Image (tube, rainbow, N blue to C red):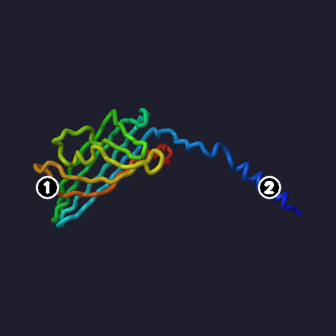
Amino acid sequence: MRTAKDIGTFLVALVATGCTGDASSPEQTPPLPAAFELVGSAQHTEDGWTVHCVIDATISGTSEIENDWTGTLVGHVVRTIVRPDGSAWEFDALVASSTFDVVTGPDGMVAVPLGGDQPPDAVAFWKAISPLHGEESSPWSYAGPWTCRGLDPAFDPRPGLVASGTWQLAPAVVRDDARGT
């Protein structure tokens, strides 16, 4: 039969083996992922008109620079307007940068300059994504709100039609296409 002393010794040994490291040491951040995926979606319907916007990009070849990180971005942003009669108009822009810098703050805030530096007279569409603002949701994952604004009235059928949505930047899932996994 086990005594209270034996059980106490067992519990102390169990607790001692479960504790490793210094409890006051900060958590270690995992290493910077080699690639990220940036996705976003926004949609709004008004008076029978619908605007749907999408961000879809990949950032690869990443490296850390001070408290920020950089990489090569390739992707596109899309603004689609569906008219009440069902016909549609679409703007699809390639976005690419060989020096894409993600700026992170000590408070977990992040700025993702999807459209690069924009001049003061840039159209609202580009100003709204340059940069995207959000916060870190977990190590190396970021998310935030996004407003898809209109383009030049000379070709955007409804430049005042605005859609609100969200975006997310997270480590890319690396697949081995040869095995399909």
Q: Of label 2 and label 1, which has the lower sequence position? A: 2
Seen from this angle, which residue lies furthest bottom?
47
Relative height, residue 10 to residue 107 (above, below): below
Nearer mark to the viewer, of 2 and 1: 2
Residue 32 percent coordinates (x, y): 47, 39
From mark 2 to mark 1, how far is it between C-alphas? Answer: 75 Å
Q: Position of residue 94 (x, y in %)?
A: 26, 42
* Disc 1 target residue: 157
Q: Residue at x 16, y 56 (%)?
A: 160
For image coordinates 68% across by 48% down, the residue present is 19
- Element class at badge 1: loop
Q: Residues within 10 Å of mark 2 (few under 14, many from 20)?
A: few
Label 1 crowding class (10 Å Cα cut-off): few <14, some 14-19, many 20+?
A: some
Residue at image x 37%, y 47%? 38
Amino acid tagged 2: Phe
Reading the image, the residue beneath label 2 is: 10
Q: Quadrant of the N terminus?
A: bottom right
Please give the name of the residue rendered at 81% of the width and 59% of the height, measured from the top-left corner: 7
